[in-house]
Image: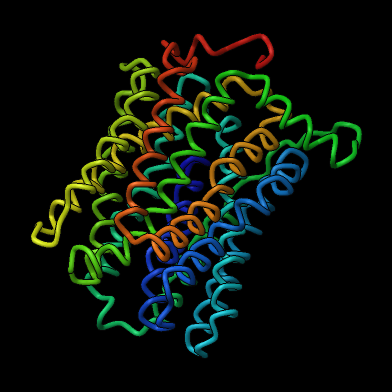
Amino acid sequence: MSVIHRLAGAAYGTHLGDQIALVSVPLVAALVFNASAELIGILVACQSMAHLLGSIPFGMLVDRRQLRSLAIASSLIALTGFTGAGLGVWAGTVAWFGAGITLAGFGTVLFALTALSILPKAAPATGLARANAAIETPRALCSFAVPLAIGLLVAGISPPLIYAAAACAALGALLFTTSLPTFETSQKQPVSRITQILEGGRYVVTHKLLLAISFCAIFWNLAFAALLVVLVPAIRDLYHFDPGAFGVALSAFGLAAFTGSWLSGRIADKLAPRFVLLFGPGSSAIAAAGILLIGPESPAVQLYACFFFIGFGPSMWLIAQNSVRQLVTPPALLGRVNAVIQTAIYGVRPLGALIGGAVAGSAGAEVGIMFVVLAFFASFAVSLFSGLRRVVSYESLKAPEAA
């Protein structure tokens, strides 16, 4: 079994558990803890807080420690967190539940950063986009299957069992990470942690493509996190859909992500990256605007269609920008650069969740959706007016500093 296949197996386990948490946290908060929109926002923020707090320290570890050991550690952290979250639901303790999902999030963050640094060591530059698609496909497939299952079963399944399933997924990831080989690590002279962080941050800020990727993703994830929070009260108060519609909508998003990831692996060598880098945020902005047209008498399939197109283009964008990052960044800086960008991308999700909960709680779910649409369009504007629209091929990204 190749390194890519082993890494893909670990990705299935990691993202299966992460998607279970992503979908079930708002539902469990509402159904088990009878949470308000503000509390739902706080709990969703807890899950994504790991990206804000863990990305930078983990990025420094990735640049200097054995990648196999870090991959194993990521699975163990996720396993512990999901077990704790399940116990929190069983005990009816919100604080315990929030702590568990936060810890599990740290495991996902560490795995993502480790995998991004393993791929350039396991695949040639010409096959990097296909390798990224192979690792992204598990996340996309899980984001389709998990919301569908939870949406259909949420009314009849015991909430603690949901997190037991997530723990089993993390255990599966652990089996694959232990089968990974060891990788060569950097042996540079030790420098201060602040210097290490600044090196990665300076490279991102001074590189026009990386800076554009960061801002594009910041606005997109701000919008998406807010949407996850706003959607629950919108389904209940505006659309009068069944609560399971939340899971089915995210399943449509996941189906789109899987389709986009699958397609990316087959057209990576045939389509100029600039088209994908513009299509991703642009299509999701238009689809989000479509949610504003949904009313109490609308069929639920209209919501599902909007979520499909919110997920399709960005899944292709994610693979394309991962490849851009890996090609323009020197190997010795890759962990820290990825960490800085991951912090910007996913670290903003807690802010988006809190804003979404605050807006929906004070001004209503409809105003919250308007905020979501504006943030999605801001993401598209960044891509449209940046150097991303001029990336004609991956080969053209082999700048001297990346050699």
Q: How is the image coloured?
A: rainbow
Left or right of 310 in this view: 322: right
Left or right of 374 in this view: 150: left
Quarter of the picture holding the C terminus? top right
Left or right of 65 in this view: 387: left
Give the x, y percent position of residue 56: 71, 45
Spot the residue most to the front.
363
Q: Nearer the viewer, residue 162 or 211?
A: 211
Q: Nearer the viewer, residue 250 or 40?
A: 40
Q: Nearer the viewer, residue 402 or 244?
A: 244
| Relative vertical location of residue 241 with respect to residue 31 in this rendering, above or below | above
Q: Residue at 26% across / 41% down in the picture?
A: 289
Q: Residue at 13% across / 62% down in the picture?
A: 296
Give the x, y percent position of residue 166: 45, 69
Give the x, y percent position of residue 142: 35, 55
Q: Residue at 31% across / 16% down in the picture?
A: 270
Q: Is residue 265 visible?
A: no
Spot the residue most to the bottom.
91
Give the x, y percent position of residue 347: 59, 48
Q: Is residue 314 visible?
A: yes
Q: Quarter of the image holding residue 79?
A: bottom right
| Relative vertical location of residue 380 with respect to residue 403 in this rendering, above or below | below
Q: Quarter of the image holding residue 159?
A: bottom left
| Relative vertical location of residue 114 with respect to residue 318 in this rendering, above or below | below
Q: Quarter of the image holding residue 359?
A: bottom left
Q: Nearer the viewer, residue 210 or 300?
A: 300
Q: How many marks?
A: 0
Q: Residue at 34% across / 42% down in the picture?
A: 373
